[in-house]
């Protein structure tokens, strides 16, 4: 077939297909198109294929059209957010890192793997929205903050306590991590507190690129945090750094700063473990109020968002440095 005939066929393609067309070959009455499917959802890929086939149907000399979608080139990395102990603000930190990364223009998604207390739907304002599924793959729920998310809570009936164990918990996690994340490049995973089945599955099956450890400045929380750090070290997952949450309470009335949980403990622990310290998030009423209302502080330009934005920047820089190390 001549290049003129190929060009004539190309001219028939709708723009959506033409802009992603890698090659078009003709042989024995069959047109074979290679299309770049990077970043497309399964549904969009199907639409593209149908559009290409429709466009070439009935074209002279074409009995069949085949469309090959080039493998998704997205290099997706997981950043796990863990803590040794519950209630230290791990979910709050995970949500706000994700929101801040999205504000910075990163393609980010969030997985709520906390089987004991999945709270991301509340934090990100997606409560009551169920993900759809297609060909056994979940479609993440779009949050209002420019990032898709999926939560363990969305796999269970509303109000049903989730107490999955062992393989069931692992399979549930796989459904979330292996969902149709499209062009998401960084997947923030909010782990349950402690060192249980979910953490092991995460390490063994999905090997995060790095982990962020959240702790309050308290001794007990710190001891537990060290256990979480050891778990990641054993799984050869680098710890990006330690975050001290609920440090320094600023009285909304008089402005006096007090330290209900002590101060500087997590920073000292990070130093003694030879790990980077990523920053300190104050204990602030506005953080709890906004979080409970499904308005992540990191989405605002207010003072309460600042420490989260700085935290996300540290994570983004770490990821970029990894890129530098690879290339
Ligand atoms: N810096 C902060 N200032 C004020 N409130 C905070 C702060 N961080 C977290 N909180 C509040 O503390 C509570 C617990 O936070 P969060 O759910 O994020 O903890 P967690 O470690 O994920 O808990 P778990 O995983 O055990 O459910 C929430 O009500 C949250 O709004």
Image: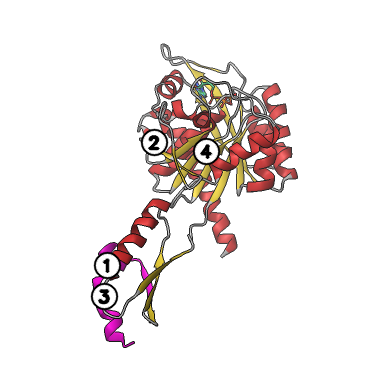
User: Distance between the Cα atoms at labels 1 and 3?
Assistant: 8 Å
Label 2 – label 3 distance at C-alpha: 43 Å
Q: Nearer the viewer, mark 1 or mark 4?
A: 1
Circle nearer the viewer, 2 or 3: 3
On the image, numbered disc 3 is attached to which residue? 59
Magenta region, mostly helix, strand or loop? helix
Q: Are marks 1 and 4 in contact (CB under 8 Å)?
A: no
CA distance for labels 4 and 3: 46 Å
Rendered location of residue 125, percent (x, y): 40, 28
Label 4: how many residues lie within 10 Å, few (<14), some (14-19) or many (20+)? many
**Residue 111, which numbered label?**
4
| Label 1 vs 2, first from the N-terminus | 1
Q: CA distance from mark 4 to mark 2?
A: 12 Å
Check disc 3: other Cα within 10 Å, few if <14, some if 14-19, many if 20+. few
Is 192 part of what is drawn in magenta?
A: no
- The span picked out in magenta is 1-23
Q: How far apart are the two marked residues, 1 and 4, measured between alpha carbons?
A: 39 Å
**In the image, residue 210 above or below residue 270:** below
**Is 61 left, or right, of 125 in this rendering?**
left
Q: Which mark is residue 143?
A: 2
Q: Is mark 4 within 8 Å of ligand 1?
A: no
| Residue 91 at x, y percent in the picture | 53, 30
Mark 1 CB lies closer than 8 A to ligand 1 = no
Considering the numbered disc 2 on the image, is that residue within a helix, a strand or a loop?
Answer: loop
Res. 177 image quadrant: top right
Read off the residue under disc 1. 55
Depth check: give the residue in front, 1 or 294: 1
Q: Does label 1 or label 4 sit earlier along the sequence? A: 1
């Amino acid at each position: 077939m001549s290049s003129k005939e190929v060009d004539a066929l190309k001219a028939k393609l709708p723009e959506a297909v033409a802009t992603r067309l890698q090659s078009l070959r003709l042989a024995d009455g069959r047109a074979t198109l290679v299309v770049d499917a990077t970043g497309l959802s399964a549904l969009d890929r199907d639409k593209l294929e149908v559009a290409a086939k429709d466009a070439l149907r009935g074209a002279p000399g074409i009995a069949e059209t085949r469309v090959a979608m080039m493998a998704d080139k997205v290099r997706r990395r997981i950043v796990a957010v863990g803590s040794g102990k519950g209630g230290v603000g791990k979910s709050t930190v995970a949500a706000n890192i994700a929101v801040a990364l999205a504000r910075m223009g990163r393609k980010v998604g969030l997985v709520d793997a906390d089987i004991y207390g999945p709270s991301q739907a509340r934090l990100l304002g997606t409560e009551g929205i169920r993900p759809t599924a297609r060909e056994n793959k979940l479609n993440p729920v779009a949050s209002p903050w420019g990032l898709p998310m999926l939560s363990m809570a969305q796999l269970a009936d509303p109000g049903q306590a989730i107490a999955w164990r062992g393989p069931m918990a692992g399979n549930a996690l796989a459904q979330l991590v292996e969902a149709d994340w499209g062009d998401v490049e960084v997947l923030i995973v909010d782990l349950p507190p402690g060192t249980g089945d979910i953490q092991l599955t995460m390490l063994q099956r999905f090997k995060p690129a790095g982990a962020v450890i959240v702790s309050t400045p308290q001794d007990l929380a710190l001891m537990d945090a060290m256990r979480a750090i050891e778990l990641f070290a054993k799984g050869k997952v680098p710890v990006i750094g330690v975050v001290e949450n609920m440090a320094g309470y600023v009285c909304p009335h008089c402005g006096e700063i007090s330290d209900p949980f002590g101060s500087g403990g997590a920073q000292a622990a990070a130093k003694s473990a030879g790990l980077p310290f990523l920053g300190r998030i104050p204990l602030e009423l506005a953080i709890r109020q906004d979080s409970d209302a499904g308005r992540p502080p990191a989405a605002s330009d207010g003072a309460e968002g600042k420490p989260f934005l700085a935290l996300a920047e540290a994570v983004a820089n770490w990821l970029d440095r990894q890129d530098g190390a690879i290339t």
